[in-house]
Image: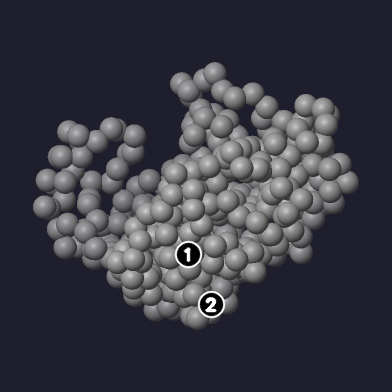
Amino acid sequence: MNNRRVVRLDKKYVMHTYSRIPIAMERGEGVRIWDSDGKEYLDFISGIGVNAVGHCHPEIVKAVESQLKRLLHCSNLYHINPQTKLAEALCEVSFADKVFFSNSGAEANEAAIKLARRFGSKLGGRRYEIITMKGSFHGRTLATLKATAQTKYQNGFGPFLPGFKYAPFNDLKGVKKAISSKTCAVMLEPIQGEGGINVASETFLRELRQFCHKEEILLILDEVQCGLGRTGKMFAYQHYGIEPDVMTLAKPLGGGMPIGATLAKEKVASAFEPGTHASTFGGNPLACSAALAFLKVVRKENLVEKARERGNYFRVGLEELKKKYSFIKAMRGKGLMIGLELGFPGKDIVNRCRDRGLLINCTMEKILRFLPPLIIEERDIDEAVKILDTVFSRL
């Protein structure tokens, strides 16, 4: 089917929850993706960070094909070999001692919220409140929607689960002001993705870690978008010389397969006992096999270091554009998670770039967001910067 036919069927049969771009993607390879009309694109949003090792990486495809022939699904009533191996691999490269697997970032954050409340209940008293940051995004379930401190996502879905308070991002005094005797955790993204690529300052996150430790409050880091090599470190928290108590992962972990993970230190993880939380499909053999292959690719191809190097290279090109065009107000981010703030809404820029074969994204109305695959080469970056320059020059 061509683009027009797919769009027509979508409008007829699919719930209208997405403001979709009127093209249908057909296949992908590496940093390129093709629509149903055969048009080729350079993908610099990579499924909002999901395709971090590119589209259809041979190692991911091989792992999925191999697992498909052995076991497609197995209930968590039993031990699952790839799940156990993946948990071990994630603990070995992080601060964590234990992992719970789910199917998405929202589910991973749901598990973190439940774990924090369960842990808080064991400390004595009614400790259930969680402080999140203004501008945050943690998911679209009812609990994670309330944790998300952006009213535009919440309109029309109340009443919400109580027990969430909001504090200004990068403002320790604001966090302390929100704390009460009921607080069990502080939850934040080291780099706010949907909030506009806002980076936590080193002072803020380090002092917040010290404060939470002192007050016996859990520090939960949502690394669903910024984790797993994206920022030039395996995990964003490693830029700050700290460790969280709980961390959530998802987007790139399965190399395109749906999987989420909630990681925790033993002291916290032990609050979960048999029957306290579960997921039918969480940690299934297929997704875990893909995730193991993803971690292998990241290590084998040195993609964490590459994200740092290519990110620096990309920033040089964007900085030149910033000098050239006064409407570019700011650039921020780490590694290959970069935001370019414009002086006007960026939707038209996204559309013009797409017309010229470059896929990017705009968040918070004026922030162009770049999340290219970690496998990009300098020539891909040069091509992207050239397209941006052409689009900007014709405004």
Which one is nearer the viewer's eye here, 72 or 238?
72
Q: Nearer the viewer, residue 116 or 324?
A: 116
- Give me the residue at 46% from left, 21% from top: 156
Chain-order first, disc 2 or disc 1? 1
Q: Residue at x 59, y 25 (%)?
A: 161
- Choose between 217 and 373: the one closer to the eye: 217
Residue under label 2, please give it.
299
Percent across and percent down for residue 343 are: 50, 47
Distance from label 2 to label 1 (Cα)? Answer: 18 Å
Name the kind of residue labelled 2 in the image.
Arg
Q: Is residue 204 visible?
A: no
Q: Is residue 207 above or below residue 375?
A: above
Q: Is residue 125 above or below residue 203?
A: above
Labelled disc at residue 316: none
Estimate the x, y position of residue 170 in percent, counting from the top left. Answer: 72, 46
Left or right, 32 with respect to 363, comes to: left
Residue at the (11%, 52%) spot, across then down: 1
Q: Residue at x 33, y 70 (%)?
A: 66
The amino acid pointed to by label 1 is Pro
The answer to which image quadrant residue 162 occupies is top right
Determine the secondary structure under disc 1: helix
- Mark closer to the observer (2, 1): 1
Residue 82, labelled with which disc?
1
